[in-house]
Image (cartoon, rainbow, N blue to C red):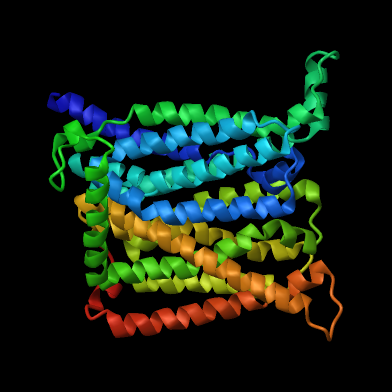
Amino acid sequence: MDNNARRRALEGNVRRFILFRLFYSARFYYPVFTVLFLDYGLTLEQFSILNIVWALTIVGAEVPSGALADIVGRKPLVVFAAALMVLEMGLILFAPMDSPTLLFLMFLGNRVCSGLSEAAASGADEALTYDSLKALGREQGWSALLERNAQVVAIGFSSAMIVGAFAYDPAVVNGLLATINPDWSVSEALVIRLPVALTFLTAIVCFLVALGLYDLDREESKAGVDLDQRAWNWSAIAAAFRQIRAAASWTLGHRFLLFVILAALALDSVGRQFVILASEYWRAIDIPVSWFGFMGAGLSLLGIVNARISRYLVNEHSPLTNFLALSAILMTGLVGLAFAIPYWGALFAIGAFAMMSMVQFLSSYYINREVDSHRRATVLSFKGLALNLGLGLASLLYTALVAGLRNDAGKARSEEQVFVESLAAFPVYYLLLFLLLIILGRALISDRERLFRKRG
């Protein structure tokens, strides 16, 4: 490949990174996620089991997939992730509602494929894109690319939330069809599958985008593996686990990166735990159910503003200043949420929702800036693993808290009262994490100048 063709291919990787993230995240069933599973015929117990399986799959596959991306190449992992997305959506699109056992098994397959896909995509697409920018001599443009990606994904995600919510309403769908032809209508059973069908189509587009990536890893061999003859065999798997050990040892020796990962864990785990419970919060502050989709879409669109703020922070302020700024935003939101103010309480949710995009932006920026290419995907997978473990710990503690509040013999509480009372624990929990992180930072980071350095 001549230089001009190679440059075009590298530029294509940068464009396709944004397209991949856009179509990968545009999941039309998200605004009706829980309801969708139940309307298919699953029980709440089965729904809980499926989510546990999904979380365990991600935790188990996150780091090995990152290491494989560094060993066998980044493009194969991205293509694998997109193929799994097609499979996961196909499983529930064609799942039979009249066979409970087969239905559960197909949804179980969906959760396993979804977890593996999330793990495979995590880090591999970023590593390939950052290496492409570096090969073009434009790695300083990484923060600008992250900002543009966050803006596009925010618009796509919010649009998918609104369309998905409307597509799940039989009255809306049949009303729209009636304006085209009065004789057209669809059954409620078919409407249930519409958000899934739309996501299945975006999964196919996502797969085609991934196939068009330029495999930069073919230009050189890494870690003693011939990438032109790459194969999914025991040798590659063994090399992947050697890569994990080496990258883990390297990360532990670079305390600044360890601080970045732990800070991301603290901020994201608390913010994301609230986001999971957001629909219950909307109900507690008297937001009508019909507005839930618009609430999620509106808060997702704030990702455009968050991206601009995040880029400003990494370009103009030090990592420690940025951590303190994000902590202040989150704490302000958590304290306000605890009051559960009708209607106006929604404003305080901005702080929690902002953490998901801002933490991803800042942690991605610092990790890609600090890590060498041959271990980049593996270290990024450490971040993904940490965020999922942090969410798991927060979920377990929250479950125990709610159980304790509900079983308090001294008071009789409704489910909504228990939920509102539990909100007071969020700022307390984050404050404890914040203090622990500051103590660890002072004790472990000898080169504290890195925490105060702005760029480079």
**Placement of 397 over or under 435, stated as above or below:** above
Toward the front, the furthest residue is: 101
- Name the image quarter holding the C terminus: bottom left
Task: Name the spot of residue 405 as percent of width and height, x first.
Answer: 74, 78
Rendered residue at 34%/39% (across/down):
77
Q: Is residue 400 left or right of residue 361?
A: right
Q: Position of residue 309 (x, y in %)?
A: 45, 58
State which quadrant residue 350 falls in. bottom right
The one of 347 and 216 positioned closer to us in this rendering: 216
At horizontal 56% and vertical 40% (from top left) the residue drawn is: 110
User: In percent of the image, x 54 and y 51: which residue is there?
Assistant: 54
Task: For residue 340, say whether it is visible.
Answer: no
Up-down relation of residue 250 to residue 5 (above or below) = below
Q: Is residue 88 left or right of residue 100?
A: left
Say above or below: 241 vs 425.
Answer: above
State the image quarter where residue 422 is shown. Answer: bottom right
Q: Nearer the viewer, residue 81 or 286?
A: 81
Along the horizontal axis of the image, is 261 left or right of 110?
Answer: left
* Residue drawn 54% across the image and 36% down it: 88
Picture coordinates of residue 120, whole percent (x, y): 39, 44
Residue 304 spot, x, y in % from top left: 51, 49
Q: Is residue 11 left or right of residue 90?
A: left
Quadrant showing the N terminus:
top left
Question: How many marks can you see?
Answer: 0
Can residue 251 be seen in the rendering of this structure? Answer: yes
